[in-house]
Amino acid sequence: MSKDISVGLIGFGTIGSGVVKLLQDNADLIRGRLGARLVIKKIADIDIETPRPVSVERSKLTTDVQEVLADPEISIVVELIGGYTHAKTIVLEAIRNGKHLVTANKALIATCGNEIFEAADNEKINIGFEASVGGTIPIIKTLKESLAGNNIDSVFGIMNGTCNYILTRMTSEGKDFESVLKDAQALGFAEADPTYDIEAVDTAHKLAITLSLSYGKRVALEDIYREGISKISPLDIEFAGELGYTIKLLAIAIRRGDVVEARIHPTMIPFDHILASVNGNFNAFHLMGDASGSVFLYGQGAGMMPTASAVVGDLIDISRDIMAGTWRRVPLRSYKKDQIEDIDLLPIDDVLTNYYFRFSAVDRPGVLSKISGILGKYDISLSSVIQKENNLDRDTGVPIVVTTYKAREKNVRMALEEIDNTLEGVVLGKTILIRIEDESLR
Amino acid sequence: MSKDISVGLIGFGTIGSGVVKLLQDNADLIRGRLGARLVIKKIADIDIETPRPVSVERSKLTTDVQEVLADPEISIVVELIGGYTHAKTIVLEAIRNGKHLVTANKALIATCGNEIFEAADNEKINIGFEASVGGTIPIIKTLKESLAGNNIDSVFGIMNGTCNYILTRMTSEGKDFESVLKDAQALGFAEADPTYDIEAVDTAHKLAITLSLSYGKRVALEDIYREGISKISPLDIEFAGELGYTIKLLAIAIRRGDVVEARIHPTMIPFDHILASVNGNFNAFHLMGDASGSVFLYGQGAGMMPTASAVVGDLIDISRDIMAGTWRRVPLRSYKKDQIEDIDLLPIDDVLTNYYFRFSAVDRPGVLSKISGILGKYDISLSSVIQKENNLDRDTGVPIVVTTYKAREKNVRMALEEIDNTLEGVVLGKTILIRIEDESLR
């Protein structure tokens, strides 16, 4: 005789269908591991007519979320509608009604996490949100549990599959951003409006959650510096290759004493670093713990079944707590509630890193020395220079590519402004800046 | 006011010192996450005189394990003495005395796991053994918890840092096995008697544990087929490179219906697979779940602080159970006790895979057709052939390298035996066989 644990689903889209399918297909395996059956009792969605890739008894479907939220038999509510307006109302009501919660909603947790976690603490509710960052990758459990004895010195993440897919194809095929984006949209790897992915909003949500778990602190989403991938050109990818780098959209968190550096931007990383081998729509996290050293996790960051795997992992986790007669062993942010405070992020101006600049200059002797003179004025030293005569173009000039030793971001901005303004007629167009991570990945 | 949880350590070597150091260095962080202090109360070792890299009050040190095992205040015993004779006695006594247990001892768990787990179940004892497989990598928690909703379709693991270090250097430097081994011994990356690592006994222990968690079953260690790396030559590494492969010592588990294929041997894997980028003394696991798809985990498989990170992760995990008033949420093998049965392993004879053969043949027309004739008789079809005239050597002949489509291991053995016996004078010396994993890694 085995106990049943009743689950209510809100949102019956792709992921919702995946969760239902997985609970059906692997029902025996899950019961064997848990010692209870996980039973979907109700599924609420505004559309219950369109056929889904799984079959569900008609009587379980409803358009009224109250049938899930108010059902006293339902122990765990899975929220899969996305966004943070309607979803937030639903989640807070579920908590008030004493339901444990599983969600894949990174926007909700990154934007309203503080309020939701506080409500959950007051009601002794557990919240599983493994699927919100890195899809199927166990990044949240690893940070909260496996590496709980470590200070997290750094996190370098490829957290958006769409951006990584586009950059991978741009790199392997030499195509430009716009044409690969169009292809990705046609293939279903990018949304019709790709802004949320391309401009790194999605990545910022995920980095905010990762930061808050790494350091057990509250993070203000708007404090995270972010740049998307739309300005990356095949020419910069080619020069990166010559320099031994590949370009990835990296989410970066580095502990600097009491403050944390947090930024998201296209980044050149060495070919032979394991992050450089993350291709296509995969996600990956390179964590550096002060005891563990490098820990690297990799998998599908999205998709029906990979995301369902993480949701069902959370359902089993919470159910194991229920079976053990406890309500939550691990604090929501890994730190006990009385330890939680706001995180102090280093302003982007104060970041020290290596840079790649591509100047478009007229083909005339002395240009490089003018450029390096201004850079030197701002304490920016060159570590390498590539100058190609045969790339001359009357309108765009010859590319001069330089990489730098560590420099301060504020100085870099001032130097580039001075170069672009005072060397008019010599340096043509706006200088391209791409940051390089090399030593800090070792 | 925060609670103290008392820990007793048995074995004060490298890992033991790492655990003490980590609990000292990160005491505040651990208390912040756990809501209790983890306090080392007693440390037992046969040698308490030799200075360690950490300082401990003299009064905590003892040569008498009973001072740890019989101390009523100690809640968790950490066993770090290794081996499975003395360690087993100690662990069983700790369990009888009601102590929870953390161990990094793969030999103990792989060899005596059944008896120890049963004793723990009877006494309601929790056992953490994350450090026993993959060092700092959260492979055990990922299999038991994060991927608990999945059937594990396959595991491909690089589980021994010494072997991977040697193969990496042989590949990058073109040196032979013996000279790299000597160097590794001088640098402390290999033991004076390297048999346990080189002959894949260590890997077999780790694969046995991984198998038992993936499938929730008991595994007989001696049923796992294993081959070490001592016969790998620079010539085979070179040919592998020409074919687009790199050679790794892989531990392989593949689900085939109701049986599981389990084998350990040097394996050619494609350059562009993420496992091929695991270099030096790192460990890695490529898991394929039926819902999750590829999940890849990578990190230090050994070493003082990386292993201590895993031990302390287990200490925090068990302490969180203690704080929550429960004794164990997750079954020791991920499956409930009444579900555990013996695993059915596929005999090596019945394995179907791709092969690389290197024949040493006399330089005479028709040799290849004789070889392929015998292979064909055993249903072995060639997918590629490399024949190099200029490598002729009077004693060893010219190398003829072939790769095959999928073939049955038993047929391969019979075919090679027939070739080596009946083509005497044409095929010189014993034919080299290395298995290839390609399709199954996709």
Image (cartoon, coloured by chain):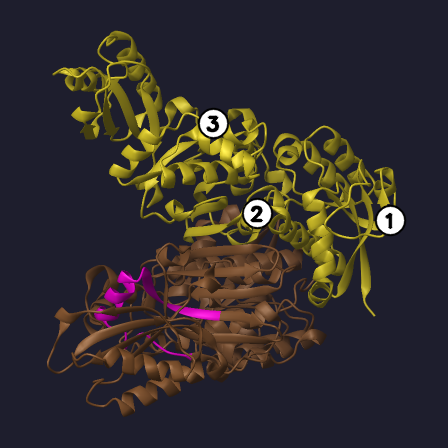
Chain colours: A brown, B yellow
Judge from the rendering whether residue A5 lies leftward or rightward of residue B7; answer left or right.
Answer: left
Q: Residue at x 37, y 54 (%)?
A: A272
Which residue matches tag 2?
B140
- Pointer 3 indicates a residue of which chain? B
Q: Same subunit under labels 2 and 1?
A: yes
The local crowd at label 3, few if under 14, some if 14 to 19, many if 20 or more residues have their Cα within 10 Å, is some
Q: Which residues are magenta?
A: A226-252
Which residue matches tag 3?
B226
Residue B102 lies, in percent from the top left, at 70, 45
Indicate whether A300 appears above or below B400: below
The local crowd at label 2, few if under 14, some if 14 to 19, many if 20 or more residues have their Cα within 10 Å, is many
- Pointer 1 indicates a residue of which chain? B
Foreground mark, 2 or 1, reads 1
Circle 1: residue type: Arg
Indicate whether B144 appears above or below A133: above
Residue A227 lies, in percent from the top left, at 37, 78
The mark found on residue B58 in the picture is: 1
